[in-house]
Amino acid sequence: MEFLFAAIGLLILLLAGDLLVRGAVNSSLRLGLPALIVSLTIVAFGTSAPELLISIEAIKYDAAGLALGNVVGSNTANILLVLGVPAIISTLDTADCNTRKSYVTMLLASVIFIAMAFVGPFTWVHGVILLTLLALILGDQAREALAHRRSLAAMEEDLEGVDPDMPWWKIGIFLVLGLIGLPLGADIFVDASLIIAKNFGVSDSVIGLTLVALGTSLPELATTVMAAIRRQADVALGNVIGSNMFNLLGIIGVASIFGDIPVDTSFLTFDLWVMLGASLLIAPFVFSNTRNMTRRWGAALCAAYFGYIWMLIH
């Protein structure tokens, strides 16, 4: 029954997050905000809303390990599973992608995050630092996008859920349902996850690293699978890199302001290093102009992920 409630909570979270993004994007564009700014801020934060609400709810339930496990586990799943599955379906032509700068930025964010974990717990001071780093990264992305104005013409087309003719009443319904559904779904999902952890005799950190992380990575998985089918490897790779940066800097940055996030020893000795190691695995595909992520590599990444999950639950 707890798994059913967890699934219902996750479904509410994902649907509410999508509604909130659609409502926020269309209202912002109707008010005259540039599509570029909407993409870099509202869409980016909106798509991370489920993870953020889960982390905040976990802190309220005095289960901070679930919050940290959600972020670390999601980042690991994003690299190994969210890139692995699309590569199996259709080889990702990563040789043509230009994601070197964002990839290096993600690695630096990961290293800074790990360093902070070792001097943890994460407090509001750490949160301010992480959010400041995120703001600097977004500012740099905005500067680069403005320097390449050709990308601005297509920006509005790339924004998900854009409808220039959407009436205000419909936008309002999207916003209200999203704002109500997110905390409701997060509350149901976290409550059910903690009961599952208790029933199976595992820590909230393990549930965060497995069940919660996998559940919150489903939107990224769906996006990368569609990108692979459409032969858009840059979208798949960029989606994963951007999501990982937001998880580390944005989710933990905001969540730590609501309460301290202690770092369990298992994170320091194992899970954080698995996250960093997984990120390093895709370096050859980022920096090589000839190497593509083939089906064999996709299978290897997926096998590594399931091996990691097996080690966590045994």
Image (spheres, helix red, strand yellow):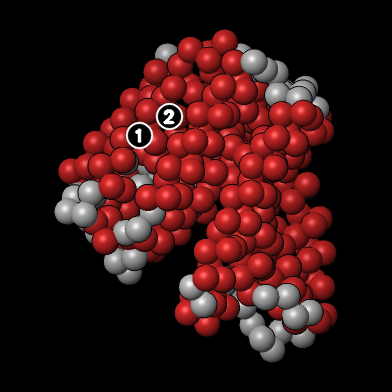
- Residue 231 vertical position relative to residue 242 in the rendered view, above or below: below
**Residue at 52% from the left image edge and 82% from the top image edge:** 153
**Residue at 48% from the left image edge and 43% from the top image edge:** 105
How far apart marks 1 and 2 lie (CA) works out to 6 Å
Q: Which residue is mark 2?
A: 276
The image quadrant that residue 113 belongs to is: top right
Q: Quadrant of the N terminus?
A: top right
Which residue is most to the bottom? 165
Q: Where residue 280 is drawn, which disc sits there?
A: 1
Q: Can residue 105 be seen in this snapshot? A: yes
x then y, percent, for residue 238: 43, 55
x then y, percent, for residue 4: 61, 40
> Is disc 1 in contact with disc 2, using a CB cutoff of under 8 Å?
yes
Q: Is residue 140 left or right of residue 182?
A: left
Q: Is residue 130 left or right of residue 234?
A: right
x then y, percent, for residue 220: 48, 52
Nearer to us in this view, 38 or 177? 38
Nearer to us in this view, 10 or 167? 167
The amino acid type of the residue labelled 1 equals Leu
- Residue 160 vertical position relative to residue 311 in the rendered view, above or below: below
The amino acid type of the residue labelled 2 equals Leu
